Amino acid sequence: MAAVNFDAIDLRLLAELQDNGRITNVELATKVGLTAPPCLRRMRTLEQSGAIKGYHAVVDPASLGYSIMVFAMVSLKSQAEADLKAFETHVRSLPEIRECHMLNGEIDFILKIVAHDLQSFQEFLTSKLTAAPNVSSVKTSLTIRTAKDEPGVPIELP
């Protein structure tokens, strides 16, 4: 989706929803200076345009036993489009991989991976990631701590 010219109210709506996706329409309307019906219409327009891609809860990984987060830098043997798409399809089938970004440069992909413990990560790495077709190398870095984890994007309000 290309950048869209949003007015001040759209930007405030997006900022509020990004901070609290569970806010009621009435509360949201009050915060952005609208009544509820036009606020809801604007939200629907933002959703239909693709500016709002969805709503979700931010779940604490540790509460579900995921104590390990690893970033993996993956290099492929071939960068032909069909091979890149095949790798992306494989990655989408693995729930432990939470993010996958194709990179420019020496590394082809960076992955964010969660695991219950080091043993389960090692098993995942050797049986599902390094064994995948077309994978040349995988370099991993275990996360020690997270200093910032902020979803979304900065929204500059006028």
Image (tube, grey):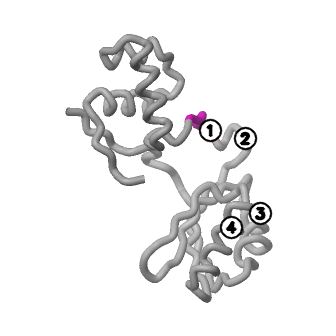
Labelled disc at residue 119:
3
**Element type where label 1 sits in the image:** loop
What residue do we see at 30% from left, 26% from top? Answer: 9
Q: Is residue 14 above or below residue 104?
A: above
Instruction: From the image, tell me which residue sits under label 2.
Output: 64
Q: Is residue 72 left or right of residue 120?
A: left
Instruction: From the image, tell me which residue sits under label 4.
Output: 89
The amino acid sitting under disc 1 is Asp
Report the magenta residues as a range. 55-60
**Distance CA(mark 2)–CA(mark 3):** 17 Å
Q: Is residue 57 magenta?
A: yes
**Distance CA(mark 3)–CA(mark 1):** 21 Å
Q: Is residue 99 above or below residue 87?
A: above
**Element type where label 2 sits in the image:** helix
What residue do we see at 62% from left, 83% from top? Answer: 137
Instruction: From the image, tell me which residue sits under label 1.
Output: 60
Q: Are marks 2 and 3 in contact (CB under 8 Å)?
A: no
